Image: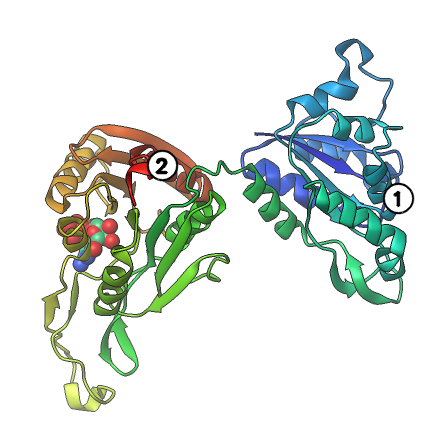
Amino acid sequence: MNVVVGITGGIAAYKAVGVVRGLVLAGHDVHVVATEAALRFVGRPTLEAISRNPVHTELYEGVAEVRHVALGQRADLVVIAPATANTVAKLAAGIADDLLGNTVLASRAPLLIAPAMHTEMWEHPATRANTALLRERGVHLVGPVAGQLTGQDSGVGRMAEPDAIVAAATGLLAPRDLEGRRLLVTAGGTREPIDPVRFVGNRSSGRQGAAIALRAAARGAEVVLVAANLDIDPPQGVELVQVGTAAELERAAREAAGRADAIVMAAAVADYRPVEVAEDKIKKDETGDELELRLVRNPDILRGLADARAEGQIVVGFAAETERDRERQLELGRAKAARKGVDLLVLNRVGWHEGFATERNAITVLSGVGTIMAEAEGTKAEVADRILDLVAAALPPSASRG
Ligand code: CTP
């Protein structure tokens, strides 16, 4: 998507570099419009290198291409970070005496601002009236937050952290194509206890499942996330049900499945659990040099959910394979899709060094009958969006479902 990042002249301008970088890493085409004052706080070369585009400041540059309106017209989102008290006032009044002011007025895209100023300025009746007016017009605000300000003082007025601004921006860019839909997503890896301190587990971090939950919520869905031992902070804005074992995951998933329009089983469910769970910690001097664990199959939760699904409910399974040969991998995927009775099967290759605990992923999505529906490679958020595109397309029109 095309994002204009407006930077105005406050000390927090140096942090705008993090906002630009976050948006570029999320795959957006970022165009920086900086005021003259902003460039006293952060250098043009830094912004050009990070945004991978020229930085615009001058109203009277690029007149032939009518740049003062073109940037705003092309934008899918305008973000202003930091927005000083002066900028907030100018936005409220619709003043267009610089390139950023023109860009904002020429844009029909959503506008997100991250105010940054001293507490007195933030609390001044003029600023309060201006922000109230902007909110009324549908402008989105992120922050300011309380914390250390530029001088010795601290209080409300500090710009929101770049990650929070990027998250708010990404939320606004998402299509609302899952509005009114309920999704059940499972994530993480189950742990099957051996004794009170040990378990049989797997290396799933829960990142991909959590990303799916987060992106589905950003696209308007009501999400229940059944999370087994996540390695990361649970995502905000979803209903979280924490579980430990496969049996707990099955119970929680069955409970939520009845109300779900789609089920995405990203969790790595342990296929086996110890037959017996020792009441007390197993001691070495009692077991000797070898310990034999007897394991029993866990129920196939995905298959159970797919068998019990209501008409129109979309069921998505995952397959993590170590097979290197592409054709053989697809064959395994096709067999798994058929065996599990899913509508979509997300195939990803895992190995000692791939797939787990990383920020990126590469997937192939198969239909229930084995057709390749999509191939995607990117951050786990980008991959999540590709999977959700297919879920959104597969869902029956909402009107036909009560
Ligand atoms: N799954 C499940 N219940 C299990 C095991 C797996 O619901 N007991 C789900 C996973 O959440 C995932 C999919 O099934 O969506 C993939 O499971 P996987 O274990 O890779 O497939 P299997 O059919 O068990 O095949 P194999 O382990 O032999 O590759």
Looking at the rendered image, the quarter that the N terminus falls into is top right
Give the SS element for disc 2: helix
Q: CA distance from mark 2 to mark 1?
A: 42 Å
User: Who is closer to the viewer here, 294 or 300?
Assistant: 300
Vertical relation: 131 (above or below) 364: below
Could you tell me residue 217's position as x and y percent? 46, 49
- The kind of residue tagged 1 is Asn
Which residue is label 1 attached to?
86
* Residue 281 seen in the current view: yes
Q: Badge 2 is on which residue?
A: 392
- Crowd rating for badge 1 (residues with CA inside 10 Å; few <14, some 14–19, many 20+): some
Rendering coords of residue 135 (x, y %): 72, 46
Q: Which of pointers 2 and 1 lies earlier in the amino acid sequence?
A: 1
Q: Residue at x 18, y 81 (%)?
A: 277
Question: Which amino acid type is marked by label 2?
Answer: Ala
Task: Say above or below: 124 vs 134.
Answer: below
Give the side of residue 358 with respect to residue 284, left or right. Answer: right
Secondary structure type for disc 1: helix
